[in-house]
Amino acid sequence: MTNTGEALGEFEAIAEFFAPLAGKGAPAFELTDDAAVYTPPPGQALVLTKDAMVEGVHFLPADPPDLIARKLLRVNLSDLAAMGADAVGYLQATAVRPADAASWLKAFARGLAEDQAIFGCRLWGGDTTSTPGPITLSLTAIGLTPPGAELRRNGARVGDLIAVTGTIGDGALGLLAQRGELPGLGAEELAYLKGRYLLPQPRLAVGRCLRGLAHAALDVSDGLVADMAHICETSKLAARLRVADIPLSPAARAVIKRDPRRLADIFKGDDYELLFTIPPAKAAELGAIAAKTGVPITLIGEVVEGSAVRLFNADGSAFDAAGLGFTHF
């Protein structure tokens, strides 16, 4: 790790904030070496994923550092969940302003420690440096899955049913709530939506249950339509989605009831729910998975011949899906 500024030296940052997250012994050796050493258990393949978060793009300047850390870890764990993998470790890099590096990193490390305990993974290494801004973060999550059991995007088949976990739209609406752009909404609904934006729930248990069951899967980060399009593109097929069947939380329904134009916002991403396709003959197993994991699963459409994602209203009329979703550039 490199220097974070005059007020906080390199070795002080490692010893105080990050070495406790690594633990003793392999793979990270309390961060006393330049790299980690890890030997996967027999019969397990490594699954690697990396996401970055930038202040003002993926989180707000006023968001608490501990919650930013937890979101950073969780969005990466969500990618592991989408592959049907179990989390074992992660590498992280932070670029923070020197003036508030000590207090910011202390809270940031506290958030990582809290989620490490929840999800059963440890810090394996990383880098810390200074920047005049914006704060820039990156994390690489490492997971395990039996070889060949990983879930891919490219396996959808004609006739597959399309399913999604949890509820859709809470993350995007939560960002609006955090910005104060949902006036008049009740305090309980606002708190719920903010929580969903700040602390997404990686569906690792569901992903594990989908091994050998789902034909294709990913997590909804860019938005339901945009991410379904990723499955369609890699599988060279099309999808039909029923708008009325998309699961919404009571808070999201309250927002849309107050302003029907907000329906478009539910497609803007940050959900981190699993979106997957499954053969109709296996659909009955979803109830057992939902019961086992405590995560609702809803059927919202089907895979068809073609090359696009189309949305339909309850009366069968087309719902305009043009431009829905988040783009990175």
Image (cartoon, grey):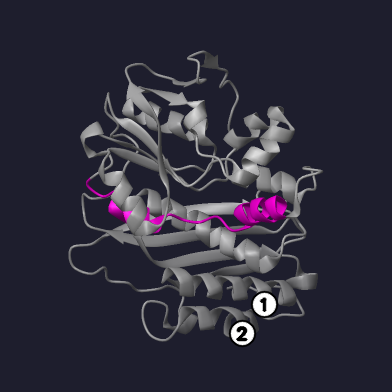
Q: Quadrant of residue 49?
A: bottom left
Viewed as shown, does residue 145 lie left or right of 301?
left
Report the residue at 52% width, 52% height from top: 51
* Circle 2: element type: helix
Marks 2 and 1: in contact by CB < 8 Å? yes
Position of residue 312 in the picture relative to residue 185 (left or right): left
Q: How far across and down, in percent of the image, does residue 144 sit?
A: 30, 61
Tally of numbered discs = 2
Q: Amino acid at mark 2?
A: Glu
Residue 288, how many percent across, how many down? 29, 51
Secondary structure that dominates the magenta span? helix
Name which residue lies at 69% across and 50% down: 189
Q: Is residue 59 visible?
A: no
Residue 105: quarter of image: bottom right
| Amino acid marked by disc 1 | Lys
Question: In the rendered image, which quarter contains the N terminus?
Answer: bottom right
Q: Position of residue 215 (x, y in %)?
A: 27, 38
Q: Which residues are magenta?
A: 188-212
Look at mark 1 in the image and give the residue it sits on: 106
Q: Which residue is mark 2?
A: 16
**Spatial distance from mark 1 to mark 2, Cα to Cα?**
8 Å
Task: State which quarter of the image contains the C terminus.
Answer: top right
**Residue at image coords 51%, 59%:** 74
Q: Residue furthest left?
A: 43
User: Does the magenta-highlighted stretch encompass residue 203?
Assistant: yes
Mark 1 or 2, closer to the camera: 1
State the residue at coordinates (68%, 81%): 9
Left or right side of 238 for 175 = right
* 227 is higher (above) or lower (below) than 207: above
Return the disc, 1 or 2, that comes first in the chain's sequence: 2
**Dot 2 crowding, Cα within 10 Å, few <14, some 14–19, many 20+:** some
